[in-house]
Amino acid sequence: MGGDGLCFEILYLSYKHLPVHLKPCFLYMATYPEDSKMRISELVKLWVAEGILKPMRSRSLEEIAEDNLKDLIDRNLIMIHSYWFSNKMRTCTIHDLLRDLSIREALKENFLGVTMKHSLEKRSRIIDDNKRRLITQRSSEEERIKSSFAKLHILRKVLKMGYVCSDEEIVRLFNFRYIDFRLTMFKNMLNTLESVSLLWNLQTVTIAGAWSFKQPTINLPAEIWEMPQLRHIKRDVGVFHLPDPPSTNIKNGRRDVMILKNLQTLRNIRNFGCTDEVVHRIPNLKKLGITYKRFRNGFGWDHYEVYNLARLRNLETLSLESSEKNVLQNVCLPPWLKKLCLRKCGLCWEDLTAVGSLPRLQVLKLMYGSVKGREWNPVEGQFLELKCLRFDGTDLVEWTADSSHFPRLENLQLRFLDYLKEIPCDIGEIPTLRSISVILCNESVNSSARKIQEDQQNLGNSDLRVRWNDRDDAMV
């Protein structure tokens, strides 16, 4: 037996001795292309949608999925590729031999099937295929199964594709739990989303596409409020419109209301109406992305009842974009927020005192147009738990800060800053600081970043990593 064969047999023993609940999680790696950098957040959603996890009363399915992933990593069957700022796993990968093993065993156990690249005319037949999981490859018939897969993934309960289904095709997907459209155009999108409401088992809807200025608003069907299995609704580019919940019936003196207990993510909703009824129906929402702009028909902030955001008691991540004035004077930020992203809000730096007082805030992203003004002097005693701070495209010139302003900061990201004179040198004295990233900023910002790194190295702090590039580098 050759060296590779012996190695493969040893790896097989590692798989054979896996606990029963971990085997399907490992076999699922066969659905990814070779050398993939797998986003852990997506992988978790897919495992949940596929129903391959063993439920536990005291933990959510997402928590169980993360536990299983960590177990596979501890057994050296999956490798961590990258982390988020706070040592939270971001992406993972799998060695080629282990991936070959997962493919071999997945085919042997009928965990998945493989078909070669097909024309769109044949996609209806593929959707109706009785395989539990079906992967469509780009490769020719002569190429081995382990070669790269196409964008079209049709699994038993998961659909990932780069085109829009017809109504007839959507109806045949009634058992599907996860649908991911990767689109470069939005032809027939409205009809497709209306048909999605027929999929009563659906858990996740993701729509992604190439960025452009012409991204039409997609209207979600009102039936969304009657789909109890929903866990995640998100759009990477552009916005959704979410209608108000339908009128409720009164039975025996009580309202007959569907509570979406499983819904955790609503991302990129335009002019979100945070009414009492809406808050009541989404009690476990964790991630919310909203955009407020172009108030019409005499509507103002009161119409959208945005003060009710503070009643979403499980909300941890909020992305807020607004072209309207007086954002923070009207939006009541939940005190338990851990991550906040602001965009186009037109705030003054003094307005950030309302943000700095959030006791659990760990991540703050100040994106284009979120804050305006030449000078920022943070208030001491705020941002006590902040670990990641990011500026994008502000007109900030003078910035005063030290360890008393951001005592637990770990990661500082500065992007597209043309006017900032320098990064405060005392930032380098923050004991928890691990990285400074400077992307497409002016040379004075680059120079101050280098100086902070040099000063810290001279003091024996070799843990601080500083990276930067200039405009020419970004064009490569």
Image: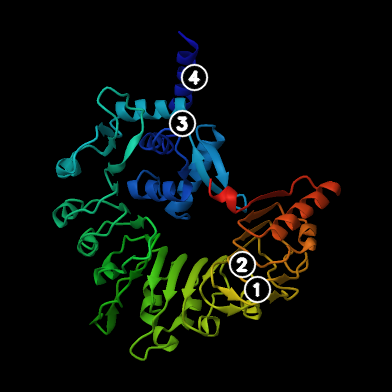
> Sequence-wise, which precedes: disc 1 or disc 4?
4
For the residues labelled 1 and 4, the Cα–Cα distance comes to 53 Å
Q: Secondary structure at mark 3?
A: loop
Please name the amino acid that badge 4 sits on: Ile
Say which mark, if any, is on residue 458.
none
The residue indicated by pointer 2 is 361
Is the residue under label 3 in contact with that under label 4 (CB below 8 Å)?
Answer: no
> Sequence-wise, which precedes: disc 1 or disc 2?
1
Viewer can see residue 262: no
Task: Tell me which corner region of the image, top left, top right, bottom left or bottom right, holds residue 19.
Answer: top left
> Sequence-wise, which precedes: disc 2 or disc 3?
3
Which of the two discs, 1 and 4, sits closer to the camera? 1
For the residues labelled 1 and 3, the Cα–Cα distance comes to 46 Å
Within-10-Å neighbours for mark 2: few <14, some 14–19, many 20+ = many
Say which mark, if any, is on residue 356.
1
**Picture coordinates of residue 255, whole percent (x, y):** 29, 80
Say which mark, if any, is on residue 10.
4
Is the residue under label 3 in contact with that under label 2 (CB below 8 Å)?
Answer: no
Is the residue under label 4 in contact with that under label 1 (CB below 8 Å)?
Answer: no
Viewer can see residue 468: yes
**Picture coordinates of residue 84, whole percent (x, y):** 58, 51
> Sequence-wise, which precedes: disc 1 or disc 3?
3
Q: On the rendered image, what quadrant is the N terminus found in?
A: top left
The residue indicated by pointer 3 is 18
Within-10-Å neighbours for mark 1: few <14, some 14–19, many 20+ = many
Q: Residue at x 83, y 52 (%)?
A: 455
Measured along the vertical axis of the image, is residue 302 above or below residue 397? below
Please name the amino acid that badge 2 sits on: Leu
Query: Between residues 236 and 262, which one lies in front from this camera angle?
Result: 236
